């Protein structure tokens, strides 16, 4: 269900029902079966628009979700693929086996590289190829399918895929907490890192007031992320006697940047241009600071999305 971003978005007459897909498992066959009957209607909407009062208005279709649903919709293999980004082409990291792809598309570790964008034309080509072969294209190489491993259900330009802020915030908050444990382990050894992990659990429970939920694999959830970020000084204080001064200062700065990014991602108002530019600057500073100060940190698909696409 999509709610129009208007002055009174919670009024019933301002609510636009887009689609309901009651599927809990994110499995491609079931999601494809749910979405496929609507594809022709979406195509007609995009071509002919919609009449509102006396005027015909243009329609653009945006895909919005986390990686599993985006992957199912576009046929993309997802964040575990060799070319993990659903928006742009780029390998996960350099390797001898993928050297030709790396030379062509760079890697998502290269934060300043200009990655070639994915195209709707390629999705159409892959749909035709998979449909004509009966879903089996074992001989099709990665340099041809580009991590589109199944028939795309809905063809929209990948530039019209919208990252889902909630999943970015959950994933990146967990990454920040793991980073603290990794930094202690790097500085003081495995035993100290293990001991700090228990300390961190107590800090989260007692000083920040969050507990893992008994679902989503025992994960933290959206509102927990905001509580952790707003009280991240409690995490930083536990690190003062464990990390070198420079590492501690960088870790504290990373949380400061992340809080600013979170407030923008969590907003419901239209973001003015100045705040958009500040967000872009801070997102890149956040990811680059992680990469420079903590060199073992790999730029994950979510960090790449935050830096390059939000």
Image: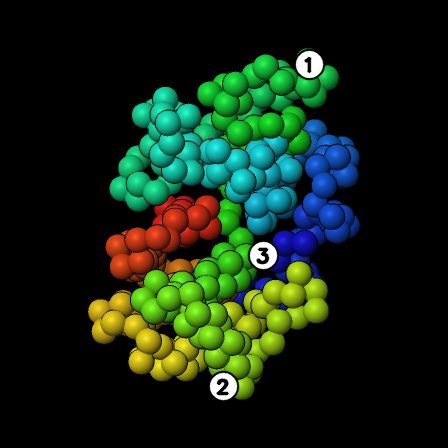
Q: Give the alpha-carbon distance from disc 3 to disc 1, as whole Å.
A: 41 Å
What is the secondary structure assignment of the residue under circle 1? helix
Of callouts 1 and 2, the N-terminal one? 1
Cα distance between the residues tagged 1 and 2:
57 Å
> Of the residues under marks 3 and 1, which one precedes in the sequence?
3
Question: Foreground residue, 44 or 67?
Answer: 67
Q: Is residue 238 visible?
A: yes
How far is the residue under mark 2 from the one under mark 3? 38 Å
Quadrant housing residue 245: bottom left
Residue at 39% from the left image edge and 49% from the top image edge: 298
- Give coordinates of residue 170: x percent, y percent: 53, 62
Report whether residue 169 is seen: no
Is residue 97 shown above or below 293? above
Q: Residue at x 72, y 41 (%)?
A: 27
Q: Which image quadrant is residue 177 in?
A: bottom left
Closer to the observer: label 2 or label 3? 2
Q: Tell me which label, 2 or 3, sits earlier in the chain.
A: 3
Q: Mark 3 and mark 2 in contact (Cβ < 8 Å)? A: no
| Residue position for label 2 | 207
Whether the residues at callouts 1 and 2 have beta carbons within 8 Å, the answer is no
Q: Position of residue 128 (x, y in %)?
A: 63, 17
Q: Nearer the viewer, mark 3 or mark 1?
A: 1
Disc 3: which residue: 4
Within 10 Å of disc 1 (Cα), the crowding (few <14, some 14-19, many 20+) is few
Residue 237: give x, y in percent of width and height. 36, 82
Q: Which mark is residue 133?
A: 1
Frontmost of labels 1 and 2 is 2
Give the answer, above or below, for where 202 lies relative to 255. Answer: below
């Amino acid at each position: 269900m999509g709610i129009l971003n208007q002055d009174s978005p919670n009024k019933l007459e301002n609510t636009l029902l887009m689609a309901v897909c009651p599927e809990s498992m994110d499995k491609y066959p079931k999601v494809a079966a749910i979405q496929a009957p609507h594809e022709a209607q979406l195509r007609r909407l995009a071509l002919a628009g919609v009449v509102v009062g006396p005027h015909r208005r243009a329609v653009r279709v945006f895909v919005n979700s986390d990686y599993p649903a985006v992957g199912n919709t576009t046929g993309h293999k997802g964040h575990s693929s060799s070319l993990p980004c659903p928006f742009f082409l780029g390998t996960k990291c350099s390797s001898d086996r993928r050297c030709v792809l790396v030379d062509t598309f760079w890697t998502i570790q290269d934060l300043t590289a200009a990655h070639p964008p994915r195209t709707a034309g390629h999705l159409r080509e892959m749909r035709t190829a998979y449909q004509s072969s009966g879903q089996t294209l074992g001989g099709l190489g990665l340099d041809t399918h580009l991590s589109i491993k199944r028939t795309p259900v809905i063809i929209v330009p990948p530039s019209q895929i919208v990252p889902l802020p909630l999943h970015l915030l959950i994933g990146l908050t967990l990454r920040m907490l793991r980073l603290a444990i990794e930094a202690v382990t790097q500085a003081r050894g495995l035993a100290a890192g293990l001991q700090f992990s228990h300390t961190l659990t107590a800090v989260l429970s007692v000083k920040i007031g969050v507990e893992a939920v008994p679902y989503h694999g025992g994960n933290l959830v959206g509102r927990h992320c905001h509580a952790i970020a707003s009280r991240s000084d409690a995490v930083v204080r536990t690190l003062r006697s464990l990390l070198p001064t420079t590492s501690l200062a960088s870790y504290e700065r990373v949380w400061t940047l992340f809080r600013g990014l979170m407030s923008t991602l969590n907003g419901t108002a239209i973001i003015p241009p100045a705040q958009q530019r500040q967000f872009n600057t801070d997102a890149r500073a956040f990811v680059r600071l992680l990469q420079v100060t903590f060199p073992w940190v790999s730029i994950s698909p979510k960090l790449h999305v935050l830096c390059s696409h939000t």
